[in-house]
Amino acid sequence: MPPMHSSKGVKGFTLFTALLAFMLILVAGLLINTMVTTERTSKQVVTEVEAQSRMQTIADLARADALQVVNYGIRNAIEEYTQVPDNPYLYNATATTWQEVVDDFGRFFFEGSSGTSGGGNSILAGKIATNLKIIIGGNPRRISGFDVTIKGDQGSGLSDAVQQVLDRTAQNSQDYLQLVQCYENTAPYDCLGTFYVNLDFSLLDDDAYEKLPSIHVRDVATGREIVQPVIARSKFRIYVPLRVFKALKYAHTIAQTGLLTASFNQQLANAGVGLCDVGRCGYRTQPFTPGPIQVEGAFNASSANTGGYLCPSDQSGLGVFEQLFPKNIPVTCDAPAAALNICPVNQPLGTYNPAEAASRAAILDSVTQGLINNQVANVNLPYPNQFALLNPTNIAVTTTKTSIITKDIIFQGVGDIPASVGRCTKLAGATTTLVFEDTDKNYFVVDTRPALKYGVRIVNLVNSTLPRETCVSYCKDNFGFLDLLFGVNVTPTACPLTACVPSTIAVPPSTATPAPATPPGTGP
């Protein structure tokens, strides 16, 4: 008979098999779920990475665009400021070396309260901040499901932050202005004159850095956002193609070898119109030649001078006697002026009234203009094509003048004319504005401009002082000493001959009251 099998063993085997199958199914399910989850997670990670990458790419592109605006804004700010017609750069007369000129320009244009621009923020800081506010205030853009905006401070904090980086860069760097081919010994003709501005944004305080613009890119679908600063917290170098320093190099050479020399300042001081000479009571009829010691002659109402030889004096309030003073005096070119190429000898320069400040000043302005034109021409600098000094034969010159009381005038026995004063007009200062024109568009920021004009002001300060003396007018002929002693007071037109002489020369005794003391330099 065949062997008998236990039913219990069969049932146990079947249960074990079922359990094993269930576990295998469960494991398979877990594996499948894990694989699905992993795949889902992987796809999500890939999607997020792709989204992050797209966001970063968009942020990088937006930052590059904004950075170009910043670069352009700084260049344009400098160009705009230099092209303001009434805002020429003031050359520092105390700067004798080229490096001092460069440093002074940097202080004026880039630095704030520590520079020569005065308190607060500099010109450049304000203009850079204005350009940055334009990009900050721009409308948001939507690009492929991402919103792109530029945020930052739109108040004074932005300008303060820009000024801080300008100041701190200047304080911590010797080359924040780096000139291109324009050094101490470079001739103006060979100087290129463009430059780099090197700014170190790593020197900013945290609060100040946060004021600067930043790019914000937001994923519309997920709400995720990344933020990236427009200007990295590191060194930032900007090339400025303007030939500003070429113009400054020419102006520096003209100043140091011409306009600001001691000899030229002395020429300016020597020029004068009116009663300008020590020990002499005659007015000048030539700009550099002293007037005569004394003058005398007959009154002639029909003469070109319309007057006689009473000492020139203030005429206000003298009424009818005004016709008795010399006026419309012709001025001619003298040998010193001819030697300076101002005018040919004896050429008429105009007429003036010795007793009127405005009349004297007009003649002095004409002489000063000729002096400065000639001095600039004497420097004799060559200029390259498309770069030149404008109007070299008629340079823009403004003057400040001083009307100095040089004579106390006493009228002895002549028409009861009260004591008065005589004056000389001298220069106190002369401001020369040199304008250099650049027409080479390779050195423009905005190439639609027809030309760039760089103005540089050079100021001469002139020390003009003169002593104060006394001149006497009296009737010289037909009236003797006894007449004057007995108080004879003649009408000037009745005098065959009147005179104006220094008080140091013997004159008839006077019945007139001496001139009152008047403080030097007062009056017109």
Image: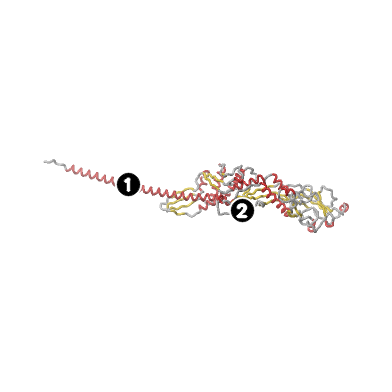
Asked if residue 279 shows in the view, the reply is yes
Of residue 106 and residue 418, the one placed in the foreground of this image is 106
Image coordinates for residue 302, horizontal then vertical, percent: 80, 59
Residue hosting label 2: 85
Q: Residue at x 50, y 54 (%)?
A: 138
For residue 194, side relative to residue 428 (left or right): left
Residue hosting label 1: 35
Ranked by sequence position, the earlier of labels 2 and 1 is: 1
Q: Residue at x 76, y 47 (%)?
A: 467
Image coordinates for residue 473, horizontal then vertical, percent: 82, 52
| Numbered label attached to residue 256 | none
Question: Which type of secondary structure does the marked residue at label 2 adopt?
Answer: loop
Q: Amino acid at mark 1?
A: Met
Image coordinates for residue 488, horizontal then vertical, percent: 86, 55
Mark 1 and mark 2 in contact (Cβ < 8 Å)? no
Image coordinates for residue 48, horizontal then vertical, percent: 40, 49
Q: In front: mark 2 or mark 1? A: 2
Alpha carbon of mark 2 to alpha carbon of mark 1: how far?
76 Å
If the image is split into quadrants, where does the N terminus sit? top left
Instruction: State the residue lying farthest toward the left.
Output: 1
